Image (spheres, rainbow, N blue to C red):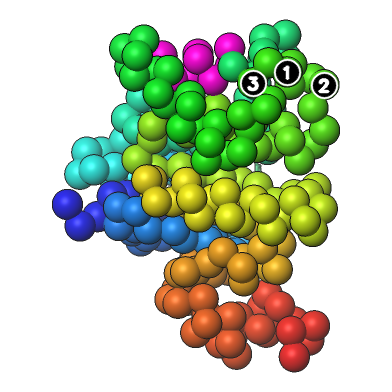
């Protein structure tokens, strides 16, 4: 299987605003892709059309060759797509372990779920947090626990919406390493504003601008492209 996720002519309009305009996008299994773009480029809309938070106006989304266009979030996660939005997904009154158990046991036997939790905690370096309640965790630790919950379901694809938001520099560097470890098992698509984080982690980048793909390619080629500097990075990048 060469393509894990694919969109064809993906379009989303809000009244007269075309937020996403005929986007053809694809990623391979185990790929790590960052999606960047200026404010209003359509990044969140694209992310939400993949996760089931938005129903596309026209166009299609395929995952492992099966059409998933317009399916609900729980159906999409059941197909093997794990999503971490900016909205907290941990239950505050359950321990981190219990949260991970909910995710891991949804589609696995008891033993397998236990193994998945151990692996998710190891990859996200949350072993010492398993008995904690999420409400008592500082932002950076909570973000790691949230990621652990997502990967406890052993998804083939992990979608992350601005995972570095609100993190310190040290936490951001650590998150980059954690995501690279997660990427050894799953493909990862990241929508991100933090360019330092993108530079650190990105292998391949897709740039959205005015709802369409402006350019995509290796991080080096994309970040040095004049059009990208103009629309996204501006003079600061010079
Ligand atoms: N629910 C909505 N109703 C109306 N217009 C919307 C809605 N969501 C997004 N838009 C519009 O669609 C366009 C794309 O917005 P979107 O939030 O996807 O961009 P973005 O790249 O994620 O921006 P940002 O980086 O600022 O978060 C913008 O013009 C925005 O105003």
Which callout, 1 or 2, points to the residue nearer the camera?
Answer: 1
Residue 142 lies in quadrant: top right
Neighbourhood count class around disc 3 (C-alpha, 10 Å): few under 14, some 14–19, many 20 upward:
some
Q: Mark 3 CB in 8 Å range of ligand 1? A: no
Residue where numbered disc 2 is placed: 136
Image location of residue 145, percent across then percent down: 64, 31
User: In the rendered structure, are the residues bearing label 1 and label 3 in contact, judged by CB atoms less than 8 Å apart?
Assistant: yes
Indicate if the residue with disc 2 has its beta carbon within 8 Å of ligand 1: no
Is residue 106 rendered to the left or right of residue 208? left
Is label 3 or label 2 in front?
3
Relative side of 146 to 20, left or right: right
Which residues are drawn in magenta?
98-107
Along the line of sight, which residue is nearer the eye, 229 or 172? 172
Disc 3 secondary structure class: loop
Could you tell me which secondary element the residue under label 2 belongs to?
helix
From this view, report whether residue 26 is shown above or below residue 61. Answer: below
* Side of 194 relative to 228 (left or right): right
Quadrant of the frame with the C terminus:
bottom right
Between residue 125 and residue 155, name the one nearer to us: 125
> Dot 2 surroundings within 10 Å: few (below 14), some, or many (20 or more)?
few
Name the residue that disc number 3 marks.
130
Please state the horizontal and vertical placement of residue 129, each as a whole percent of the image.
69, 25
In the image, residue 184 lies at what x, y percent? 39, 51
What secondary structure is the magenta-colored segment mainly?
helix
Question: Which badge, 3 or 2, is on the more N-terminal residue?
Answer: 3
Q: Does the magenta stretch include residue 19?
A: no
Residue linked to disc 1: 132
Tell me if residue 208 can be seen. no
């Amino acid at each position: 299987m060469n393509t894990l996720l694919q969109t064809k002519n993906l379009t989303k309009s809000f009244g007269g605003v075309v937020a996403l305009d005929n986007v053809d996008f694809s990623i391979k299994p185990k790929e790590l892709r960052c999606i960047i773009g200026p404010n209003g480029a359509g990044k969140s809309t694209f992310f939400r059309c993949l996760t089931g938070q938005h129903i596309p106006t026209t166009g299609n989304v395929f995952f492992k060759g099966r059409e998933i266009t317009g399916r609900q979030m729980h159906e999409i996660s059941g197909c093997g797509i794990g999503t971490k939005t900016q909205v907290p997904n941990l239950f505050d009154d359950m321990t981190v372990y219990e949260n991970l158990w909910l995710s891991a046991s949804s589609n696995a036997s008891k033993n397998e779920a236990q193994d998945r939790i151990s692996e998710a905690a190891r990859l996200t370096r949350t072993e010492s947090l398993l008995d904690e309640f999420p409400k008592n965790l500082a932002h950076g630790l909570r973000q790691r626990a949230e990621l652990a919950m997502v990967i406890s379901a052993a998804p083939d694809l992990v979608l992350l919406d601005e995972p570095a938001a609100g993190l310190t520099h040290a936490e951001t560097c650590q998150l980059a390493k954690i995501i690279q470890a997660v990427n050894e098992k799953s493909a990862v698509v990241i929508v991100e504003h933090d360019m330092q984080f993108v530079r650190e982690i990105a292998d391949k980048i897709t740039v959205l601008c005015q709802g369409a793909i402006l350019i995509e390619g290796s991080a080096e080629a994309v970040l040095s492209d004049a059009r990208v500097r103009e629309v996204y990075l501006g003079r600061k990048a010079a």
